[in-house]
Image: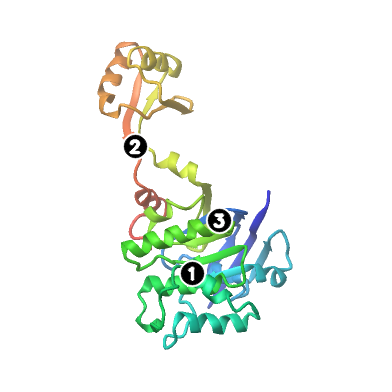
Amino acid sequence: MDYVLKTEGITKAYGGKLVVDHVNMHVKKGDIYGFIGKNGAGKTTFMRLVAGLAAPLEGNMELFGSRELEKQRVRIGSLIEQPGIYDAMTAWENMEIMRRNFGITDKQATDQMLEFVGLSKAGKKKVKNFSLGMKQRLGIAIALYRNPDFLILDEPINGLDPEGIIEMRDLLLKLNQEKQITILISSHILGELSKIATNYGIIKEGALIEEFESDELKSRCRRCQKLVVDDVELAVTILEERCHITNYDVPEPGMIRVFESLEHSWQWNQELVQGGVKLMESYLTGQDLEGYFMDLLGGAKYV
């Protein structure tokens, strides 16, 4: 499997306190990897370690299958914390400075990049007068200047208005699908993140506690009626023949999950009991993404 990023036991401490605790992360080529955790959980510090802005205490890291990290980091673009831009200049002037710093000789590159991120009409407006969304797009434009294969974004939609969030979502999908850029993105707006992420990593108190794909997340959050019975085979027969239920599964011995006609669960319960099935439990479960992540991270506010 082609990994853009693979870490083993990456650890970082400040003042004797572990901020990143033996993290093993796997970001596959083509992923939009949603990185989720509470404030202070270690997201930004980990991203800084990957980008080379800080050095790990211990552990190993591979970028594009190689441990020659400095050589591979030229293939990374990043927007971590605040974009490094000059408020008293226009977007075009900021980009021209970066073009020269990066040694890009194509003088059309600035106009092309501003067009790509939707800032071609910003004209002579100074960055200090930009909306937050415009500043974020300018930061991404700078991160994209060297045509990276891997983009690291720390809370790029934080504080944006609804229109700005949609524009950012469309831009990220465009980068991933049209330019084939792999993206590692943190965000606390989980409903929006779920619209673009293909994989997730959950960090809690510095430790990456779980990684899973978006299909697995949808399955975990899917609403269903869980039935705990003594005879699954008999129960399934009754559900199919008497209740006309076809959308169900048996995730483990003694348990059935039904995903349809949930409003009629009382009727299934009645049919099962009358048919000789011992029904130990029957309850509705499933939740929205934010509720799921809040439970996973220990409740309370997670951002």
Relative to 146, 41 lies left or right: left
Q: Residue at x 54, y 54 (%)?
A: 177
Q: Is residue 245 visible?
A: yes
Q: Are marks 2 and 1 in contact (CB under 8 Å)?
A: no
Q: Which residue is mark 1?
A: 115
Amino acid under label 3?
Answer: Glu
Distance between the Cα atoms at labels 2 and 1? 46 Å
Residue 64: x and y in percent read: 69, 60
Q: Are marks 3 and 2 in contact (CB under 8 Å)?
A: no
Classify 73 as above or below 274.
below
Residue 298: x and y in percent read: 39, 54
Q: Residue at x 37, y 20 (%)?
A: 245
Q: Which residue is mark 2?
A: 285
Place residue 244 in its image quadrant: top left
Amino acid under label 1?
Answer: Glu
Residue 191: x and y in percent read: 37, 53
Distance between the Cα atoms at labels 3 and 2? 38 Å
Q: Secondary structure at mark 2?
A: strand
Numbered disc in front, either 2 or 1: 1
Relative to 183, 193 lies left or right: left
Place residue 258 in its image quadrant: top left
Numbered disc in front, either 1 or 3: 1
Q: Is residue 204 visible?
A: no
Q: Residues within 10 Å of mark 3 (few under 14, many from 20)?
A: few
Answer with mark 1 or mark 3, whichever residue precedes in sequence: 1
Q: Residues within 10 Å of mark 1 (few under 14, many from 20)?
A: some
Q: Secondary structure at mark 3?
A: helix
Amino acid under label 2?
Answer: Thr
Q: Residues within 10 Å of mark 2 (few under 14, many from 20)?
A: few
Answer with mark 2 or mark 1, whichever residue precedes in sequence: 1
Residue 42: x and y in percent read: 50, 66
Q: Which residue is mark 3?
A: 178
